[in-house]
Amino acid sequence: MRTKTSTFEICGHSINVAGKSFVYIHDSESNQNFAAVSFEVEVRKDFAGQPYFVVKADALLDDKPLHTHLWLLETTDFNAAYDLKNALCTLLGDPPSRYQMQHCTGALLFRGTGND
């Protein structure tokens, strides 16, 4: 199992005047702050065709009206990716359903290209 994490730190969350919820993230490498408005898990494949999961945040750069996607975690562990995404969504005030919180115990199917 491979896991790559970033230099991000979750600093807290708040709700602004319009009722929009944010999770504040600090990047210690670039010393920038972000306000994340949503989180998702993206499934990708490496060069060998093996799947891996990227937890991404749709965020606003602090003090600038720029949207960006932050890659918070890259892992081959399905459950770790969704545990992080579910925890961050809960901070936003959008907790996952009981069904979404269940861990995956099956295996992902790997289909070769025929040249493998």
Image (cartoon, helix red, strand yellow):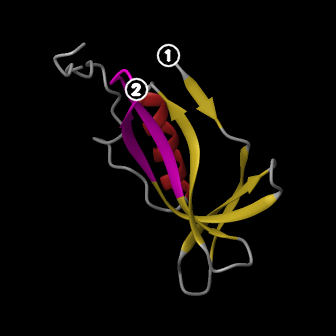
Q: Is residue 101 left or right of residue 83?
A: left
- Disc 2 packing (10 Å; few <14; some 14–19; many ≥20): few
Which residues make up the magenta segment? 40-57
Name the foreground residue: 13 vs 73.
Answer: 73
Q: CA distance from mark 1 to mark 2?
A: 16 Å
What secondary structure is the stretch in magenta mostly built from? strand
Residue 13: which quarter of the image?
bottom right
* Left or right side of 8 for 111: left
49 inside magenta stretch: yes
| Residue under label 2 | 47
Residue depicted at 55% across the width and 86% down the height: 18
Q: Earlier in the sequence, mark 1 or mark 2?
A: 1
Q: Residue at left 26%, top 22%?
A: 108
Which amino acid is tagged 2?
Phe
Q: In the picture, which quadrant includes the C terminus? A: top left
Residue nearest the viewer, comparing 83 with 60: 60
Q: Which residue is mark 1?
A: 1
User: Residue 84, how many percent across, how many down?
Assistant: 52, 40
- Location of residue 58 in the rendering, given as x and y in whole percent from the top left corner: 52, 62
Q: Is residue 85 above or below residue 65?
A: above
- Residue 62, percent from left and from top: 72, 72
**Outermost left residue:** 114
Q: Is residue 100 left or right of residue 25?
A: left
SS at circle 1: loop
Residue at 73% x, 42% y is 7
Query: Which residue is outermost to the bottom?
Result: 18
